[in-house]
Image (cartoon, grey):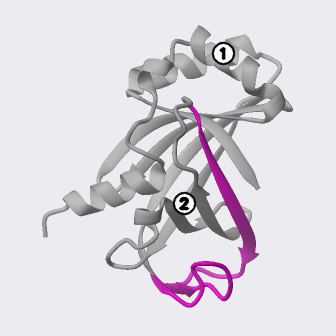
């Protein structure tokens, strides 16, 4: 699956202001709330992270999925693109070794987890807006993601401009990158 999205990191006040504003712009699109836990896997020297790749098990109330997410390097656009593959699994694991693909036969170990409370609003088929409160390693951050299709590209850009979000463009990286940065800052 190809995923294209804008990502913004904001403070708590701005997060809830934008959430309420988006709810008022799209009153027919009810915000759906869910909790998900991402369990991140990598080598101790962060082999995948250095290749802009995330290997995770995502747990929701309904299931567990093993997901491999490969980010494309930024091309100057304000949005990011990645390729994601996933499949359902039965249980959480402490180690994962993929059997095929370019990361096959490398042993990856569980590095930790990140818990997200997500509020999702889907104004139309070409746009989904996720408001994520992420907690990990004693930190909490507030992220707004706008995932869109090619058909929704222009409308999403106009919405981003209307909400004045470009100044909050996430320059740090996705949830996994922020998790691993926080992990490297922990003093043992």
Q: Nearer the viewer, residue 123 or 119?
A: 123
Q: CA distance from mark 2 to mark 1?
A: 29 Å
Counting residues from the start of the chain, the first of labels 2 and 1 encountered is: 2
Give x and y (percent) for residue 177. Answer: 41, 54
Q: Residues within 10 Å of mark 2 (few under 14, many from 20)?
A: some
Q: Nearer the viewer, residue 7 or 63?
A: 7
Q: Which residue is mark 1?
A: 159
Identify the residue shown where x is 28% and y is 62%: 183
Q: Which residue is mark 2?
A: 37
Residue 89 belongs to magenta span: yes
Identify the residue shown where x is 69% and y is 12%: 24
Tell me the SS state at disc 2.
strand
- Tell me the quarter of the image containing the C terminus: bottom left
Left or right, 93 with respect to 12, comes to right
Tell me the SS state at disc 1.
helix
Identify the residue shown where x is 55% and y is 45%: 117
- Residue 165 vs 85, above or below: the answer is above
């Amino acid at each position: 699956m190809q995923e294209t999205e804008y990502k913004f990191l904001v403070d708590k006040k701005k997060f809830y202001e934008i959430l309420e504003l988006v709810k008022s712009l799209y009153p027919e699109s009810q915000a759906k709330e869910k909790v998900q836990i991402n369990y991140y896997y990598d080598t101790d020297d962060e082999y995948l992270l250095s290749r802009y790749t995330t290997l995770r098990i995502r747990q929701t109330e309904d299931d567990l999925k093993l997901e491999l997410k490969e980010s494309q390097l930024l091309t100057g656009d304000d949005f990011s693109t990645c390729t994601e593959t996933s499949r359902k699994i039965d249980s959480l694991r402490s180690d994962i070794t993929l059997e095929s693909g370019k990361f096959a036969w490398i042993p990856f170990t569980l590095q930790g987890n990140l818990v997200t409370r997500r509020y999702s609003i889907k104004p139309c088929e070409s746009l989904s807006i996720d408001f994520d409160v992420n907690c990990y390693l004693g930190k909490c951050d507030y992220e707004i993601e706008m995932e869109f299709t090619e058909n929704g590209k222009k409308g999403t850009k106009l919405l981003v401009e209307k909400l004045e979000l470009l100044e909050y463009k996430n320059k740090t990286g996705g949830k996994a990158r922020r998790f691993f940065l926080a992990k490297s800052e922990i003093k043992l």
